[in-house]
Image: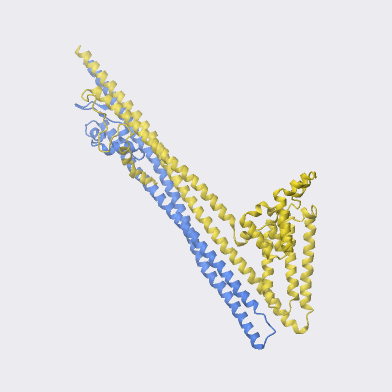
Chain colours: A yellow, B blue
Amino acid sequence: MSVSSVQVRTPQLTPANPAAPGVSGAGSSLLPESSGSLDGGDDAMSMLALTMSKLSNSEANASEKDVKLHLDKAKLKHKEREEEISKASDDAKKGGFMDDLTNNSGVLGAVGLITFCPELVAADLILHASGISDKLDGEDNLVIAAAMTGGGAALVAGGGAIAARKSGVVDGAADTMGLDGVGDFIREDHTGLTDEKVRPAMQYLWAADLAVVSLAVTGATFGSGAPLTLAIIAVALSGAAMAVQKTKCMDGVTGEGSSEYWAIGLQAGSLAFSLGSAGAGILAPATSVAAGTTTAKTVATSLEAGTDVAKGSDQIQRSVNQHDADLHTISAKKAEMEAARHQRIVDMVIDGIKESKKSNEAAMQSLQGAIETKDQTAMTVGAMRG
Amino acid sequence: MTTIQGPTTPVTLTATAFSSSDSSPARGALEQASLLQPPENQLLFTGDLSEMIAALGVMAGKAEKKAIHADRLTAAKTQEAAEASKLSHMKDAAEARLQAGVWSGAGQAAAGVVEGVGAGCTNTSGSEIAKAQNQRVQGFSSLGADGLKGGTTIVSAFDKHDGDMADIGAAADDMKITQAKRAYDEATDGCKEAYKVVTDAIVFYREYSSTKAQTEQAAIHKA
């Protein structure tokens, strides 16, 4: 609804409105019904006063309806704007491919990434996508990890253990046996590991694992794999160290503050493996120096290639999400403009009401003056005749 | 006192007759429906100088208000057009940014794949021909990756430029919106001023006609 369209609509509104008293149609007279004589001066002026009063009322009614209509529309647009802003905010938070991976993985995924167990990572992604992970605590995740690593009977045992914990079977059995508190102890999560705790480190873990994967993919064709293998382990240990330091996830397992020591140990291990990798290259036979140089070059290239693929995918995903956020922002802006337009019309109508009120007051005052003057003249003429 | 005691019908000069029809539908209908001449036209030719002054004041105020009201509508329409243009520019910028991001990302990912293929050809234990072939593959893949990155970066840069131009267009629209808002506010103030001109003229006429009537009555008394 635009200001200009209101102007176009204006002449049509009142005649079409049967509720507006005194205004029956665009082409009809605004004078009152011919119930009284218009010949007499006083009668005519009374009629005029009545007409003006009715006109004033009809104006007020029509304006009130207009104000209400546009206020309702403005409110609707404000609500629409807030919804769009919320959607834009959600889209902007989504980030890129790496953020998607991070947000859809948790404790189990972290264990899988640290231990290079793709099955665990896949299981974690599935559990998150299905929403089941919300019902699992740190211990459940560790049980699943152990069960999947063990395989076979361990899978059955692990599933049974989680089901027993969750269903309250253990609790009930402990109560039956008179072991108060044992059920609660079993049901309680002693690790303190939650998805939220490991999430800040997930991006690093994913990045480290992607680097390792790219190394490993290239390494599949290597002749001499020792330096590469050591380098892969070094990268993995470094990623694990970052994750532990960031999440303090080992605090719940080995005691408060122990995560720092774990991180230091893992970093030291990473350094040792890096040195080992370099040493393996240096100590290689002279005949394989050329091959070692090629290996180093290939490692660098493969790392770059893996990073490029990850970064590229991340950027595409980020761009798409940003585009969605931009579109919602535009919709929000549009709603804001429309709300402002409706508000402007409301202000204009209110200004008109004020002006109209003043006009009608002035008109009534003038009419009153006219009646008084006429009366005085009549009295004077009567006195003169008398 | 604003009534002219004419021979047959009284002519009442009121502010209502001169107020704008911009916001009140009923008043708009009144002005559309009325077939009578505006009251100030009758005052203009009475021969009384003060009445002529009052009529001219009312007419000037009315004309001013009509012109300012037209300005206000023009400003509102300009603002609407600028707002629509800004939204369109914002959308263009968003699309251009998406294309730039997708080109850049796809280029980088594709370059990574090509580079990876080249990096995978590391078999150094084969024949000299195989080694030479591997080296050629590595060279081509490196070249291809660089070409992909370069090409998509250029395309992405063009898209970014389009996005920047759309942003500049949106900023220019913002300025137009601000100007139109100012013009609208000024016109609104102007409407109030014009209304005051009309009101002043009517007050003047009311006082004048009241004094005139009193003088006439005094003269009748004296006679």
Picture quadrant of residue A36: top left
Residue at the spot 52% in from the left edge and 56% down from the top edge: A326
Instruction: Point out residue A271 in the picture as x, y percentages from the top left corner.
Output: 78, 67
Q: Nearer the viewer, residue B50 or A241?
A: A241
Placement of A112 over or under A78, stated as above or below:
below
Q: Is residue A310 left or right of residue A68?
A: right
Q: Nearer the viewer, residue B130 or B32?
A: B130
Picture quadrant of residue A269: bottom right
Q: Is residue B217 left or right of residue A209?
A: left
The answer to whether residue A246 is visible is no
Q: Nearer the viewer, residue A372 or A160?
A: A160
Placement of A297 over or under A135, stated as above or below:
below
Instruction: Point out residue A227 in the picture as x, y percentages from the top left corner.
Output: 75, 75
Q: Quadrant of the C terminus of chain A?
A: top left
The answer to whether residue B103 is visible is yes
Residue at the spot 72% in from the left edge and 55% down from the top edge: A160
Placement of B45 over or under B165, stated as above or below:
above
Instruction: Point out residue B64 in the picture as x, y percentages from the top left corner.
Output: 33, 41
Residue at the spot 80% in from the left edge and 62% down from the top edge: A265
Q: Is residue A274 left or right of residue B27?
A: right
Placement of B43 over or under A122, stated as above or below:
above
